[in-house]
Amino acid sequence: MKGQDHQTLIVLDFGGQYKELIARVVRECKVHSIIIPGSTPVKELKKMNPIGIILTGGPYSVYDATAPHCEKELFDMNIPILGICYGMQLMAYTLGGTVSPCNVSEYGDTKVTVTKKNKILDCLGGETITLMSHTDYVSRLPEGFETCAVSRDCPTASMADEPRNLYAVQFHPEVERTKKGKKIIRSFLYDVCGAKGDYNMNDFIEAEVKRIREQVGDKHVVLGLSGGVDSSVTAAILAKAIPNQLTCIFVDHGMMRLNEGNEIEAAFKDRALNFVRVDAEDRFLKKLQGITEPEQKRKIIGEEFVRVFEEESSKYEGSFLAQGTIYPDVIESGANNSATIKSHHNVGGLPKETKFIGLVEPLRGLFKDEVRKLGKKLGLPDELVQRQPFPGPGLSVRCIGEITKEKLDLLRKADAIYREEINKAGLKYDQYFAVLTSMRSVGVMGDFRTYNYVLALRAVITSDFMTCEKARVPYPVLEKVTSRIVNEVQGIARVVYDLTGKPPATIEWE
């Protein structure tokens, strides 16, 4: 987010699973936020000039020798601080209070009663439902603090030292299950930190366009365009910033959904960029002949994609390489000393051996919901901006067994019918798609016996794609989808619905 002149709130990370959610809620309140390690020295924090700091939760007991801590001087910076869960216990422990194991641990929805109103709890009224998740609690408050809320089993559900602008809650206000939780965070931002609400996507576009122009100058930029949300929005903002200096290489591996390649090409044909569509379907299918093992299919497709992109991009030696890296990729890959959750291929800079002269990452500081908002402001069509997650190997991981053009075409048609009927019914699921199994089943069409493929339908509800539950698609919709598929897609004899959640299953079948 370099070059933007706005207020910033720092989220100090102590290993909490909701750190990204905290940062996103802050941004929803129109305040810029960044996540940095809880061990960051106070002198570095001062240089960032934050309007406030939020301490995240974490899976530790603050009194354990290996638990993460912060410098005591953090609380003498004269900057408002909000501690959440472990962050509350850390605040109390560091300032001389006592943290003890709970007699009764609290997990899940918990009623909290406000005993003393203050600037962040005024919005709650007398009682509210919160999400608790703790096995320790603050058993003795630090000097200057008062108890502000309690629950049945926690005598200190919230505490505050208002003259010093130090506030803490044992529950998680950042999650939807805490009623009015986002209002607590908003109150902290505006009533305690004095936020101006100066962070928005219009300002981002203006600042990022300026930054891109300064970085690139009169050089050329090459982007591997997959048609996904991140790469599409990257292409749109680059085309706005450096018109006619961008080449988008779309490697069409032949495993896109029905008409998807044409839709991607149409979305960018009138923009100030060079759109290159590489028809590599035959090349990929030849590599996949006889291959049935899922991981092997993925590796072959990934490696072949790199080869095709390298061949095409070699025509633009001396250019910058653009990537659709977003903020969660950076956080999860352990950038800026954060804990590594999982490595992302697009984090870590340019490869050692490359003909590109630099890396351009316009979305590196944005969350996915912000990327979608940015895409709409840049005029991208909804079918791209609101595109469901779609794996890089495409329909190959939804076509069980060996990949052939015949099977892909069957799946494309069936999948299109399913998605069309879900949309016509006005149903909103986080992901839904069809899977062509490798199994065949006996059927009857007219007076003739058939022996054709079994197709599976899948629809899930999830907030993070780490877990999911089955979507309860209404039977009339499933009946209509089934009827259309077996009548309109010759080669499919039977349709089934996948009822499995994650865990134990994954969302994709392969």
Image (cartoon, rainbow, N blue to C red):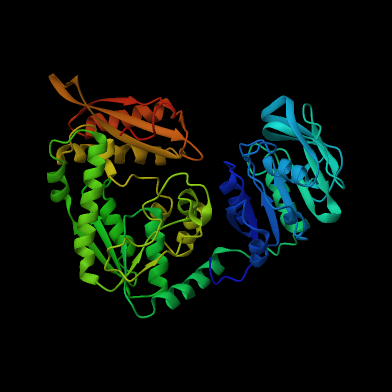
Q: State which quadrant residue 276 falls in.
A: bottom left
Residue 267, position in %: x, y? Answer: 33, 61
Residue 228, position in %: x, y? Answer: 36, 53
**Which residue shows up at 26% across the image and 56% down it?**
262
Residue 17, position in %: x, y? Answer: 57, 41
Q: From the viewer's perspective, tell me whether residue 6 is left or right of residue 429.
A: right
Q: From the viewer's perspective, tell me whether residue 185 is left or right of residue 373.
A: right
> Please, which residue is most extreme toward the front here?
65
Against 188, residue 86 (above or below) is above
Q: From the viewer's perspective, tell me whether residue 294 is left or right of residue 324.
A: left
Q: State which quadrant residue 173 falls in.
A: top right
Depth check, front residue: 330 or 420: 330
For the question of whether residue 413 can be seen, the reply is no
**Which residue shows up at 38% across the image and 70% down it?**
239
Q: From the viewer's perspective, tell me whether residue 82 is left or right of residue 277.
A: right
Depth check, front residue: 227 or 159: 159
Pick the quarter of the image with the C terminus: top left
Against 154, residue 419 (above or below) is below
Against 113, residue 314 (above or below) is below
> Please, which residue is most extreme toward the bottom here?
218
Tag count:
0
Residue 415, position in %: x, y? Answer: 30, 38
For the question of whether residue 121 can be seen, the reply is yes
Depth check, front residue: 391 or 479: 391
